Image: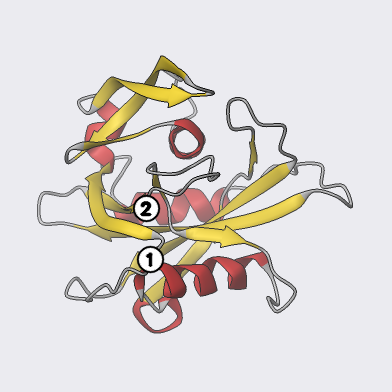
Amino acid sequence: MSIIHIDRIKQSILDHSPRQVPVRKQTRQAAVSVVLRPNAQNDTEALFILRAKKDGDPWSGHMAFPGGHLEDKDASLRHAAERETHEEIGLDLVVHGAFIGQIDPVQANPRGRDLDMVVTPFVYELKQHDVQFAPNYEVADVLWGSLRDMYTGDSHTTGQFMVGGERVSYPGYGVGDEIVWGLTYRMLDLFFAMLDPNWIER
């Protein structure tokens, strides 16, 4: 069975104990939903959003997993991920998703910003393929990317991005005409490292 087959992914997550990241009183916490779906080619695809461009947003125009900050009204980080996913793209994961588990959190450090924030990913399987999305003003597009192409390196690429007013090159994964890089790229590398103990970050 392929390492990125949905059943293999489920088992790997069940066997995994997410690492702990120090969270201080002033640390902002956020959560994202890693929504997966198997396809007929024995591959597993992941859902990404293209964030709308917004002044002052360090992730403006970036590819990302749906999600956002933990708010007082949220019962948990997982609830925050589900709430934000519903708000951003109209996907109700309680109805249309099967929760698989939590994976390693990531400390966010956008270039040029001093930001104390920890982002926790929660993984779901989409229960049906014909779900209709309704992106809000924060989302420019919804795209699916092949985990197999990312894992094998077939979609690995380098992109030019504006960071702190300078144009710099960073590695990423091509999804359609866009590139997944930065924080979400790091999450994917941690995800592949969980699936494959021999994984080497590119």
Residue under the point 47% across and 69% down: 99
Local crowd at mark 2 within 10 Å, few (<14), some, or many (≥20)? some
Which residue is outermost to the left? 40
In-image side of 177 versus 31 (left or right): left
Three-letter amino acid code at disc 1? Tyr
Seen in the picture, residue 122 relative to 61 is either above or below; the reply is below
Count of numbered tags: 2
Instruction: Tell me residue 52's x, y (percent).
Output: 37, 52
Per the model, the C-alpha gap separating discs 2 and 1 is 7 Å
Identity of the residue furthest to the right in this view = 25
Within 10 angstroms of label 1, few (less than 14), some, or many (20 or more) residues?
few
Q: Which residue is mark 1?
A: 137
Between 112 and 202, the one lying in front of the other is: 112
Residue at 70%, 77% in the rendered image: 75
Q: Secondary structure at mark 1?
A: loop
The percent position of residue 146, horizontal first and vertical second, equals 23, 43
Residue at x 44%, y 44% (from the top left corner): 60
In-image side of 93 versus 20 (left or right): left
> Are the residues at dot 2 and dot 1 in contact (C-beta closer than 8 Å)?
yes
Q: Quick one: SS at disc 2? A: loop
Please give the residue where the numbered disc 2 appears in the rendered image: 52
What amino acid does circle 2 point to? Ala
Could you say which is closer to the camera, residue 78 or residue 134? 134
